[in-house]
Image (cartoon, grey):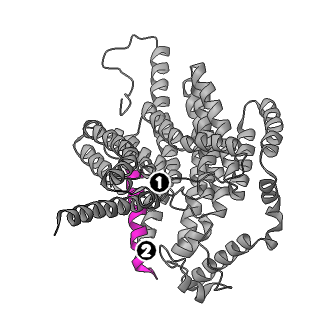
Amino acid sequence: MAANDSQVYQEASYANLFSELAIRNHHNHSDVCCRRYDGFSSCYSVAYEILGDITMRDWLVLLIVAGALPLILVRPYIGVLVWSWLGYMNPHRLTWGFAYDFPFAQIVGVTTLIGLLFCKERKGFSVTAMIGIWLTFVLWMNISTLFSLVPESAWPEWDRTMKIQLFSIVTLILMRSKVRIKYLVWTIVACLAFFGVKGGIFSILTGGNYLVWGPAGSFIEGNNSLGVAMVMIMPLMWYLVLQAEQKYVRLGLYAAMGLTALAILATHSRGAFLAIAAMLGFVWLKSRKKGWLAVALIVCAPLFWFAMPPAWQERMTSISEYQQDGSAMGRINAWEFAFNLAKDRPLTGGGFSAFTPELFEKYAPDPEDFHDAHSIYFEVLGEHGFVGLFLFLLLGIMAFREAGKVSRRARASPELGWVVDLGAMLQASLVGYAVGGAFLGLAYFDLYYHLVVLIALLRVVSADEIESVTFAESTESSGFQRLSHDRPPAKRFQ
């Protein structure tokens, strides 16, 4: 091959390589490469422009995770926080290079399990009625998967769901202290508020005319899912406001809440709109200052409403006219499909990923109008039968009641004001999930199960603190000097 021909071949190979890399990394730069290609130097400069932006984000995520791994081995509860960061914020999905599909969560998960295996902390947990129902539901999802109608799609979804359930149990084991609960709440709020603040600013700059979306390939990729997820963290943000001691932290949280509320509206999701209305109503009922909160809601609601464009207002007011809405009727068709499938298979349903065009032809009233579940309740009904739906509903009810019970029990002790506030706000988050989830399929969303775990942790930690306070008060009232071996029961973890 001649030298000139070799050079041309080499330059063309580089051009093809960079074009293929751009396409694979979700950039539409291939046309740029073709347009600006006039020899190897030009192609190299374009590739450098692409790769320069990619590598910085990719390596940043990689360095953070790699730097955390030794800490996780020593203190495995840090693994729960890093796992939550990867699961909720999905930083790897904000890159365009090798980090996009890199198994960061799997590496962090395995490292956390190794750290848990060798740590000296107690590794058990109390199986309350709520935890028993949760574990029974997990078991039933395994059973229904064995009888799945679409096994080739069911098992990958089973794999993802069981990883979430496993790490929820790990969270229950490792996060049993006030400080660790605080770290977990801050991590969850910060990760999802990132999209709330970013989406709120985007909505202001665009006048609310464009939808706010979540990271690709995640539970919250869709506008509806992201909207409900942000509704679920709003009460937790308010809990952090109540607990914040520094003024600048409170002001920052107030600003983040306002922008997140705007981002929720900017998703144009009617389910999220109903969810935030129900959640705010519950927060008002639980508030100690109902008058001030009512005034704030009355003042802010019209401001947010008229800040949105007319198209958004028309969409929200069309909720009552669902018969004329093709999207709403498609959801009803999917719900009837789930009910018919469950009637045919009442115990196990169709298994994970049962909402397929092939099964719609058999069970849907309109086989041509294929939709996903668009409801946590009908999703569980269609995929796990009436037994699965019963366990799912019972878990939600028991979690709500347990949070209220823990909150009421803690009111007797002034030191447990944080338990009172967090218990009430966890209830508000469950209300947002229950209402918003009625219109989208987030039955296996890890945030919901983290809420259940937080309620269980709150029960254990508050019981320990009440026991400690009671012991101290009884010792002081006895009139005797406490001996060195008469110490109150220590917390299980520091």
Q: Is mark 1 on a helix, strand or loop?
A: helix
- Identify the mark at residue 131; answer none if there is no mark: 1
Q: Pick whichever, 461 or 28, lies toward us.
A: 28
**Which stretch is magenta?**
147-170
The answer to whether residue 205 is left or right of residue 52 is right
Q: Quadrant of the C terminus?
A: top left
Magenta region, mostly helix, strand or loop? Answer: helix
- Name the residue rendered at 49%, 74% in the picture: 353
As for residue 83 lying within the magenta part, the answer is no
Mark 2, residue position:
154
Residue 141 vertical placement versus 98 (above, below): below
The answer to whether residue 267 is left or right of residue 76 is right
Q: Which of marks 2 and 1 is in front?
A: 2
Residue 15 vertical placement versus 303 (above, below): below
Amino acid type of disc 1?
Ile
How far apart marks 2 and 1 lie (CA) works out to 25 Å
Amino acid type of disc 2?
Ala
As for residue 156 lying within the magenta part, the answer is yes
Q: Count the marks: how many?
A: 2
Place residue 24 in its image quadrant.
bottom left
Residue 161 vertical placement versus 177 (above, below): below
* CA neighbours of label 1 inside 10 A, class few (<14), some (14 to 19), many (20+): some
- Identify the mark at residue 351; answer none if there is no mark: none
Q: Position of residue 11 (x, y in %)?
A: 28, 60
Q: What element carries label 2?
A: helix
